[in-house]
Image (cartoon, helix red, strand yellow):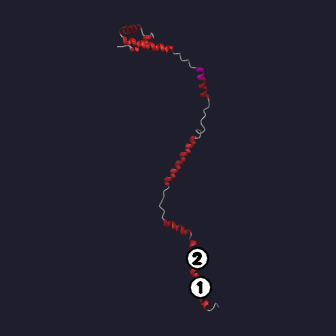
Amino acid sequence: MHPESELTAYLTNALAPAERARVAEHLQRCAECRRALEESRAVLSGLAAVPAVPEPEWGRYRAELRARLEAPVRRAWWARPMPAMVAAGVAGVAVVLALQGHHERRPVELAAVEETMLGARLPLLEQYRVVERLDLLEDLEAIRHLDRLGDGGR
Protein backbone atom coordinates (compact mmCIF):
# COMPACT_ATOMS: atom_id res chain seq x y z
CA MET A 1 0.00 0.00 0.00
CA HIS A 2 1.35 3.41 -1.03
CA PRO A 3 1.30 6.18 1.61
CA GLU A 4 0.33 8.91 -0.87
CA SER A 5 -1.80 10.83 1.60
CA GLU A 6 1.09 10.94 4.09
CA LEU A 7 3.76 12.30 1.72
CA THR A 8 3.00 15.97 2.38
CA ALA A 9 2.97 15.37 6.13
CA TYR A 10 6.34 13.57 5.73
CA LEU A 11 7.81 16.60 3.91
CA THR A 12 6.55 19.08 6.54
CA ASN A 13 7.66 16.89 9.49
CA ALA A 14 4.09 16.57 10.69
CA LEU A 15 4.18 12.78 11.23
CA ALA A 16 4.79 10.98 14.49
CA PRO A 17 8.28 9.32 14.67
CA ALA A 18 6.93 5.80 14.11
CA GLU A 19 4.85 6.90 11.09
CA ARG A 20 7.77 8.87 9.67
CA ALA A 21 10.04 5.79 9.92
CA ARG A 22 7.43 3.61 8.18
CA VAL A 23 7.04 6.13 5.26
CA ALA A 24 10.88 6.49 4.96
CA GLU A 25 11.28 2.71 4.76
CA HIS A 26 8.56 2.55 2.05
CA LEU A 27 10.23 5.34 0.06
CA GLN A 28 13.51 3.34 -0.02
CA ARG A 29 11.72 0.43 -1.71
CA CYS A 30 9.17 2.29 -3.99
CA ALA A 31 10.34 4.39 -6.94
CA GLU A 32 6.78 5.55 -7.72
CA CYS A 33 6.35 7.06 -4.24
CA ARG A 34 9.79 8.71 -4.49
CA ARG A 35 8.67 10.42 -7.73
CA ALA A 36 5.44 11.53 -6.02
CA LEU A 37 7.51 12.81 -3.05
CA GLU A 38 9.72 14.87 -5.39
CA GLU A 39 6.64 16.31 -7.15
CA SER A 40 5.14 17.26 -3.79
CA ARG A 41 8.47 18.81 -2.72
CA ALA A 42 8.50 20.91 -5.95
CA VAL A 43 4.93 22.06 -5.34
CA LEU A 44 5.68 22.99 -1.72
CA SER A 45 8.83 24.91 -2.70
CA GLY A 46 6.84 26.72 -5.42
CA LEU A 47 4.22 27.68 -2.86
CA ALA A 48 6.91 28.90 -0.50
CA ALA A 49 8.17 31.25 -3.24
CA VAL A 50 4.76 32.89 -3.59
CA PRO A 51 4.54 36.08 -1.55
CA ALA A 52 2.31 35.89 1.47
CA VAL A 53 -1.17 37.29 1.23
CA PRO A 54 -1.29 40.61 3.06
CA GLU A 55 -3.31 40.70 6.22
CA PRO A 56 -6.69 42.29 5.72
CA GLU A 57 -7.11 45.80 7.01
CA TRP A 58 -9.69 44.99 9.63
CA GLY A 59 -9.79 48.51 11.00
CA ARG A 60 -10.86 50.01 7.68
CA TYR A 61 -13.26 47.12 7.06
CA ARG A 62 -14.92 47.60 10.45
CA ALA A 63 -15.23 51.36 9.89
CA GLU A 64 -16.88 50.84 6.49
CA LEU A 65 -19.19 48.19 7.90
CA ARG A 66 -20.19 50.38 10.83
CA ALA A 67 -20.86 53.33 8.49
CA ARG A 68 -23.10 51.20 6.30
CA LEU A 69 -24.99 49.76 9.26
CA GLU A 70 -25.57 53.16 10.84
CA ALA A 71 -26.55 54.91 7.61
CA PRO A 72 -30.27 55.55 7.21
CA VAL A 73 -31.97 53.21 4.79
CA ARG A 74 -33.07 55.04 1.69
CA ARG A 75 -35.51 53.27 -0.51
CA ALA A 76 -35.94 54.14 -4.15
CA TRP A 77 -38.72 56.62 -4.90
CA TRP A 78 -40.78 54.00 -6.70
CA ALA A 79 -40.52 51.48 -3.84
CA ARG A 80 -42.12 53.74 -1.24
CA PRO A 81 -45.73 53.86 -2.46
CA MET A 82 -45.61 50.33 -3.84
CA PRO A 83 -47.98 48.71 -1.28
CA ALA A 84 -50.60 51.40 -1.91
CA MET A 85 -50.27 51.04 -5.68
CA VAL A 86 -50.57 47.27 -5.48
CA ALA A 87 -53.65 47.53 -3.26
CA ALA A 88 -55.26 50.03 -5.64
CA GLY A 89 -54.53 47.81 -8.62
CA VAL A 90 -55.99 44.74 -6.93
CA ALA A 91 -59.09 46.71 -5.93
CA GLY A 92 -59.52 47.98 -9.49
CA VAL A 93 -59.25 44.49 -10.95
CA ALA A 94 -61.76 43.21 -8.37
CA VAL A 95 -64.27 45.94 -9.29
CA VAL A 96 -63.91 45.24 -13.01
CA LEU A 97 -64.36 41.51 -12.49
CA ALA A 98 -67.35 42.06 -10.21
CA LEU A 99 -69.05 44.31 -12.74
CA GLN A 100 -68.33 41.96 -15.60
CA GLY A 101 -69.71 39.00 -13.70
CA HIS A 102 -73.08 40.66 -12.96
CA HIS A 103 -73.49 42.37 -16.30
CA GLU A 104 -75.35 39.96 -18.50
CA ARG A 105 -76.36 40.93 -21.98
CA ARG A 106 -79.95 40.10 -22.69
CA PRO A 107 -81.12 39.83 -26.26
CA VAL A 108 -82.95 43.00 -27.17
CA GLU A 109 -86.15 42.55 -29.08
CA LEU A 110 -86.49 45.00 -31.92
CA ALA A 111 -90.26 45.28 -31.48
CA ALA A 112 -89.83 46.41 -27.87
CA VAL A 113 -87.39 49.09 -28.98
CA GLU A 114 -89.76 50.29 -31.70
CA GLU A 115 -92.67 50.49 -29.24
CA THR A 116 -90.57 52.51 -26.86
CA MET A 117 -89.54 54.90 -29.60
CA LEU A 118 -93.09 55.27 -30.87
CA GLY A 119 -94.39 55.91 -27.36
CA ALA A 120 -91.85 58.68 -26.86
CA ARG A 121 -92.91 60.34 -30.14
CA LEU A 122 -96.67 59.87 -29.88
CA PRO A 123 -97.62 63.59 -29.89
CA LEU A 124 -95.52 64.09 -33.02
CA LEU A 125 -97.22 61.13 -34.70
CA GLU A 126 -100.68 62.49 -33.87
CA GLN A 127 -99.77 65.71 -35.63
CA TYR A 128 -98.36 63.70 -38.53
CA ARG A 129 -101.77 62.13 -39.10
CA VAL A 130 -103.23 65.61 -39.47
CA VAL A 131 -100.47 66.62 -41.87
CA GLU A 132 -100.92 63.37 -43.78
CA ARG A 133 -104.61 64.20 -44.31
CA LEU A 134 -103.87 67.79 -45.26
CA ASP A 135 -103.99 67.03 -48.97
CA LEU A 136 -107.34 65.29 -48.44
CA LEU A 137 -108.62 68.37 -46.59
CA GLU A 138 -107.44 70.60 -49.43
CA ASP A 139 -109.30 68.39 -51.90
CA LEU A 140 -112.47 68.65 -49.80
CA GLU A 141 -112.20 72.43 -49.73
CA ALA A 142 -111.72 72.50 -53.49
CA ILE A 143 -114.82 70.33 -53.94
CA ARG A 144 -116.85 72.68 -51.75
CA HIS A 145 -115.88 75.59 -53.89
CA LEU A 146 -116.56 73.83 -57.21
CA ASP A 147 -120.11 75.07 -57.31
CA ARG A 148 -118.82 78.63 -57.09
CA LEU A 149 -116.57 78.08 -60.04
CA GLY A 150 -119.53 77.22 -62.22
CA ASP A 151 -121.38 80.41 -61.19
CA GLY A 152 -118.59 82.56 -62.38
CA GLY A 153 -117.13 83.18 -58.98
CA ARG A 154 -120.11 84.88 -57.36
The residue at 51%/14% (across/down) is: 49
On the question of residue 14 being in view, the answer is no
Q: Left or right of 6: which side holds 81?
A: right
Could you say which disc has been placed on residue 97 in the image?
none
- The amino acid type of the residue labelled 1 equals Ala
Mark 2 vs mark 1: give the one in front: 1
Give the secondary structure at mark 1: helix
Tell me how far mark 2 sits from mark 1, CA to CA.
Answer: 17 Å
Give the secondary structure at mark 2: helix
Q: Nearer the viewer, residue 11 or 93?
A: 11
For disc 1, the neighbor class at 10 Å (few under 14, some 14 to 19, many from 20) is few
Would you place residue 26 above or below residue 96 in this image?
above
Residue 153 painted magenta: no
Q: Earlier in the sequence, mark 2 or mark 1?
A: 2
Q: Which residue is mark 2?
A: 131
Q: Nearer the viewer, residue 102 or 139?
A: 139
User: Residue 111: image x %, image y %?
Assistant: 49, 67
In the picture as drawn, the residue positioned furthest to the bottom comes out as 151
Would you place residue 148 above or below residue 81 in this image?
below
The secondary structure that most of the magenta stretch takes on is: helix
- The amino acid type of the residue labelled 2 equals Val
Q: Which quadrant holds residue 7? A: top left
The residue at 49%/15% (across/down) is: 47
For disc 2, the neighbor class at 10 Å (few under 14, some 14 to 19, many from 20) is few
Q: Which residue is mark 1?
A: 142
User: Residue 80: image x %, image y %?
Assistant: 59, 39
The magenta stretch is: 57-61
User: Residue 131: image x %, image y %?
Assistant: 58, 76
